Amino acid sequence: MKSVSTHADAWRRGGRPAARASLTGRFQAWLPKLVLAPSVAISLCFIYGFMLWTFVLSLTNSRMLPSYDFVGFAQYARLMANERWWVAATNLGVFGALFVGICLVLGAGLAILLDQRIRQEGVLRTIYLYPMALSFIVTGVVWKWLLNPGLGIQAMVRGWGFESFTFDWLVDPDMAVYTLVIAAVWQASGFVMALFLAGLRGIDDSILKAAQLDGASLPRVYRRVVMPCLRPVVFSAVMILSHIAIKSFDLVVALTGGGPGYASDLPATFMYAHAFTRAQIGMGSASAILMLGGVLAILVPYLYSELRSRRHG
Amino acid sequence: MSALEIQRVCKDFGSTRVLQDVSLAIDSGEFLILVGPSGCGKSTLMNAIAGLEPVTSGEIHIGGEEITWRTPAERDIAMVFQSYALYPSMTVRGNIAFGLEMRKVPKAEREAAVERVADLLQISHLLERKPSQLSGGQRQRVAMGRALAREPKVYLFDEPLSNLDAKLRVEMRTEIKKLHQRLGTTIVYVTHDQIEAMTLADSIAVMRDGCILQFGTPDEIYNDPVDIFVAGFMGSPSMNFVPAVLEGAPGDYRLRVATPGADDLLLPWPVSRETAALAECRGRTLTLGLRPEHFSEEDARLGEQAEGTPLSATVSVVEPTGADILLRLPLGDGEITARVNPDCRVAAGERLGLRVDMRRAVLFDPDSERRLA
Amino acid sequence: MDNVIRSRTPAARAGRLLLQAVLVVAALWYLLPLAVMVLTSLKPLDEIGAGSLLTLPEHPTLAPWLKAWGSACTGMRCEGVSGYFWNSFAIVIPAVIIATLIGALNGYALTKWRFRGAELLFALMLFGCFIPFQVILLPMAQTLGWLGLSSSRAGLVLVHVVFGIAFTTLFFRNFYVSVPDELVAAAKLDGAGFFRIFWRILLPVSKPIIVVSVIWQFTQIWNDFLFGVAFSGHDTQPVTVALNNLVNTSTGVKEYNVDMAAAMIAALPTLLVYVLAGKYFVRGLTAGSVKG
């Protein structure tokens, strides 16, 4: 157990010795707190204060400008009755589930394949991961071009002689949300691969050797021995990916613009549109609070299990 | 005037008390060793002296001044850490000079001090290296050099040798002893190694559960342990503890040791070592403490001239160490270890006659574990 | 799985070949958008309609790049993205420096001068890593207005620092936890104080984590769009916002080659960082996530 007490604490408890400690001693004891104070103050104001503020706004009928006419939970009720919100929320569900699922499968698959003593591993790894260094705006712009039916992939494949090939999801209201999945998976799956690869490399080699000596085949070793070891990786990958999904804003703006119509809206774009361009600050705030709720719903169980395992482990 | 005096120091971590009413004092130039099993509070006491942990109550004086609430920098002490804690970004020279630099010692004096300790510790050729380029033993020397450069009132050594391999550890132990003899510095030294404690110390404080069990010279600690713990902790192989019933009367006490499958053994308790406490223990089963070297092989040539009380037992294991032979034999409710001459020709399973020197035996109360005689 | 002897039957070899093929196909998939982006950006506009995505440019030209840089229209103006490119640097550099410095000091104070409640404070700050920023957008906009920082680069620097220190503190804290406490104890006994220990002992060993932190902050802030679009003015937009405007400006013929060149310009700094310091980039990503 590490000590968490210092002279400063002892002074407060005992009181008596304070007079005897030197001035520099007392100053030194307070310095760390002094250094941390601005950051803590910033966190309190800009994170917690602002969250509260947004919550307050969500209880008002603010439109163009914040006003403080409280209307209770009326904005949440309006939100629940708003078709566009439900489209956005459903889209998030579809997008999130597919994005997380595909990234995990693809990332884990690539990591396992890369882990088979591939000679060009370094190069391949670099290629798989580079999209993560790009802005979602760049990703969106590129994929918008690739998915453009007239000039992109569809045109290219038709040019190869497959005249009836159609790939026009970008302009299809029912399919537009899947283009988001494609672009987002392209960007983030390499990162999941890196997480898994790091996890695989962290597994004790002797466990694998022991399993092989026991006569287990390679796929079996992976399924029975390796995968269970990677559970924490899966856990944090899911957590990061869902976090990315909920925050997804730039990709939608650049790739589909939420369209056609508002067919590919996500809560993040919904919130921005209502708060900043449609003069619905009250409703925009309410949607932001619901997004926060979504993040917390993922985060709290994660942190809980993390803390618990740390205490027991 | 004491160089270091600790008065009734207590230390709590949360609700656990890790130092309980610790008091001790040493003179200038004395080598004090704090020894005990891990978790006994010896490192906490060291940190309290250094000012790295504030105490909950009590006072600490260095050189007659109370320094309980001073910062580490204000105490004029230097410390050698178990991990050496050399500053990785500085050269050896920078490491040694850092403390002087912080105390605004002029550059020329700093250089002189670095040369002096480098000379003393034979690390002059390493001065421009970084700690990462040094071997374990060299790092250890640099860590000592860093402490020596400042010439503080008290040196603290926190298990400084425990990261070295066995051979180097013995060498450095000797070197530390030489340094102490030569420089006459006041040293507080924490270790869990009882051989280090015995070889280096002027005085030893044996600690357990935050208390000092015994504070005395190595000889006192070894030959006059105050309780079973101290007796068992010091010495290797450790002291044998044998249940024995006290019989007889003052002037003629005997200890009856019952060994399954053998006749009871009667060991007379030397009159010179009788204490008043024994009178109340007559008929009780006590714990008899016999160190392995209190046994010796029966020497037929000496006959009746031989000293000590004779006994014989069947040897179960023979462990030659080179310098001597350790024998395991049944006595009392278990096996004991006896240390005999290396020329003793005995094989496992054979019966051997031994003598035990009862004048050096000790007797404990098995309930309180305190010493009776 | 090194050091394990593989069987060398023909079937095993075929499997190995398949494995390599799969990996190469995957690599091509990841490379496709970049290749298309580069190819398109080097084609004259008339070749775009004629050829397909992957046809090589017959008459390669840098004109789209020059136009994207200097004269393409981003909304009302037609000055290219160059001004915004420098805007991004003007925002990123101070924000990265300030956030990293604060993070380093925080991490140091939290790990090497532990005090009651330090862990709680850390958890409190860490939460900043996780909130969806939509939840602070409106109050932030108003606060920037009060501070007179609306639509200014300084305002954006402030926002990025505020939400960057959670990450930088996390990085440095996790790094300093592994630096032995004895180093600080030794320096204290040697007579060094809080800042001196930081400056002389801790900072010189922090190079790797400084690189991680700088790279992380750099890519995060450079790639940011939400804060840029919400808090910047016409003159202070970062390059991501300008790129989005450029692509969505619908005057005259759609110049896809210029769009792609602009996208490349916006992507180059972070790509360059990735290529030069990929190891640290990955460390930042994983440190910011796994440990979180």
Image (tube, coloured by chain):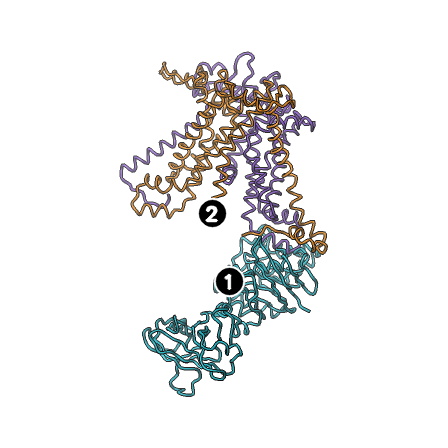
Chain shown cyan: that is B
Given the image, on which type of amino acid does mark 1 rest?
Answer: Pro
Query: Callout 1 environment at 10 Å: few (<14), some (14 to 19), or many (20+)?
Result: some
Q: Point out which mark residue A249 bears.
A: none
Q: Amino acid at mark 2?
A: His
In the image, taking residue A175 as reference, residue B51 lies left or right, namely right
Number of labels in the image equals 2
Q: Is residue C69 visible?
A: no
Residue B64 appears left or right of C208: right
The chain that hosts pointer 1 is: B
Q: Residue at x 56, y 55 (%)?
A: B16
Residue B309 is situated, as x and y percent measured from the top left of the image, at 42, 82
Q: Give the structural element (helix, strand or loop) at label 2.
A: helix
- Residue at the extreme bottom: B304
Residue at label 2?
Answer: A312
Instruction: Give me the chain that's orange.
Output: A
Residue A4 location (% of width, % of height): 59, 50
Please name whichever residue, C167 or A275, is drawn nearer the observer in this view of the structure: A275
Residue farthest to the top?
A: C252
- The picture's colour for chain C is purple
User: Residue under circle 1?
Assistant: B37
Residue B214 shown left or right of residue B283 in the figure: right
